[in-house]
Image (cartoon, rainbow, N blue to C red):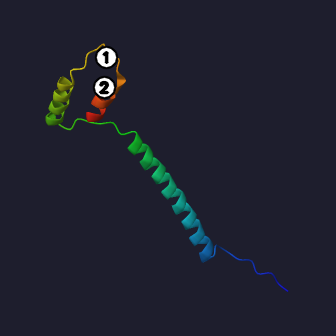
Amino acid sequence: MSLVYQRGFSAVEVVMAVFIAAAIGVVGYLAYDRTQETNKTPTVSGTKDLDVANKTLEDTNLDASTTDTTELDSELNNF
């Protein structure tokens, strides 16, 4: 009885390796995308946005001695 040694990889082994690599890539991409979405900072895209922000700040007219955080929170949510 002679032994026959297999050379190379079977198609099933190659497909499994590609599937595992793709799954790891998808999980990594989703984690990266979630991190980017969470860390987004608002940006001013033009003078119109800046004018709206300045008008909103002028309209709030909050007193510096305000200790009521409910008012501050509501103004922040409206902004």
Residue labelled with disc 2: 71
Q: Please tell me in which quadrant of the rendered image residue 24 appears.
A: bottom right
**Mark closer to the chain start, 2 or 1:** 1
Is 42 placed left or right of 37 in the picture?
left
Q: Please tell me in which quadrant of the rendered image residue 68 appears.
A: top left
Where residue 66 is drawn, which disc sits there?
Answer: 1
Seen from the viewer's position, the closer of residues 25 and 13 is 25
Is 14 placed left or right of 60 in the picture?
right
* Three-letter amino acid code at the position of disc 1: Thr
Residue at 36 percent across and 23 percent down: it is 69
Is 65 placed left or right of 30 in the picture?
left
Question: Quarter of the image containing the C terminus?
Answer: top left
> The residue tagged with tag 2: helix, strand or loop?
helix
Residue at 64 percent across and 73 percent down: it is 9
Seen from the viewer's position, the closer of residues 32 and 2 is 32
Relative image position of residue 10 (x, y in whole percent): 63, 76
Relative image position of residue 72 (x, y in whole percent): 31, 25
Q: Single out the residue that lies furthest toward the top.
A: 65
Mark 1 and mark 2 in contact (Cβ < 8 Å)? yes
Residue at 80 percent across and 81 percent down: it is 3
* Three-letter amino acid code at the position of disc 2: Glu
Badge 2: how crowded within 10 Å, few (<14), some, or many (20+)?
Answer: few
Seen from the viewer's position, the closer of residues 79 and 71 is 71
Q: As displayed, is residue 37 above or below residue 58?
A: below
Relative image position of residue 29 (x, y in whole percent): 46, 53
Where residue 3 is drawn, which disc sits there?
Answer: none
Question: Quarter of the image containing the N terminus?
Answer: bottom right
